Image (spheres, grey):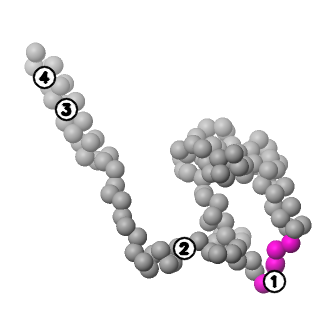
Amino acid sequence: MTISTRRLAGAIALCSAVCAFLFQPAAAQELTDAQRTAYRRPETIPFPKDNPYTPEKAALGKMLFFDTRLSRDKNLNCASCHNPSFGWEVPFAKAIGADIELAATNATPLQYIVRAVPV
């Protein structure tokens, strides 16, 4: 082996070791009882008293969920990511953006919609 080949092999070994150290998976953390209580799933959907559930609102929500007119390019709807065929979850590691490319972030899980603050 020549000196430059040894240096290259050493550099590759060093980079591999650094990458293995930096990108190791995070250790799973156990939730405390207080965390489980604070973030437990509600037993019922908490509808506001001044805006109760009606079948008409449910039908409107369903229409909006599947309506592509709400997206920037009129080509996506909520179900594009939150697919009913996949249990309302995203079947990809990342969300798909309006440009039909993987987005930088995950799609927000639907269960957080219950806690969303109206804008």
**Front residue (pair 58, 3):** 58
- Identify residue type, mark 4: Arg
Pair 4/3: label in front = 3
Q: Quadrant of the N terminus?
A: top left
Label disc, if present, on residue 31 of the rendered structure: none
SS assignment at label 3 = helix
State the predominant SS element of the stretch in magenta. loop
Q: Which residue position holds label 2?
A: 40
Give the mark nearer the N terminus: 1 vs 3. Answer: 3
Q: Closest to the observer: 86 or 24?
A: 86
Q: Residues within 10 Å of mark 4 (few under 14, many from 20)?
A: few
Q: Earlier in the sequence, mark 4 or mark 1?
A: 4
Which amino acid type corresponds to the residue marked 2 in the rendered image?
A: Arg
Question: Please, what is the three-letter code of the amino acid marked with disc 3?
Answer: Ala
Distance CA(mark 3)–CA(mark 2): 46 Å
Query: Does the residue at mark 2 contact the one at mark 4 (Cβ under 8 Å)?
Result: no
Q: Earlier in the sequence, mark 2 or mark 4?
A: 4
Whether 107 is among the magenta residues is no
Q: Give residue 50's mark.
A: 1
**Could you give the CA–CA distance between mark 2 and mark 1, rounded to whole angstroms?**
25 Å
Binning the other alpha carbons within 10 Å of mark 3 as few (below 14), some (14 to 19) or many (20 upward) gives few
The reply to whether discs 1 and 3 touch (Cβ–Cβ < 8 Å) is no
Q: Are marks 4 and 3 in contact (CB under 8 Å)?
A: no
Q: Dot 1: few (<14), some (14–19), or many (≥20) neighbours within 10 Å?
A: few
Q: Is residue 80 left or right of residue 13?
A: right
Q: Identify the residue at the far front of this view.
A: 43
Residue beneath disc 3: 13
| Front one among 12 and 54 | 54
Q: At x 82% / y 74%, what residue is drawn?
A: 53
Q: Do the CB atoms of the residues marked 2 and 1 lie less than 8 Å apart?
A: no
Q: Nearer the viewer, mark 3 or mark 2?
A: 2
List the residue tagged with mark 4.
Answer: 6
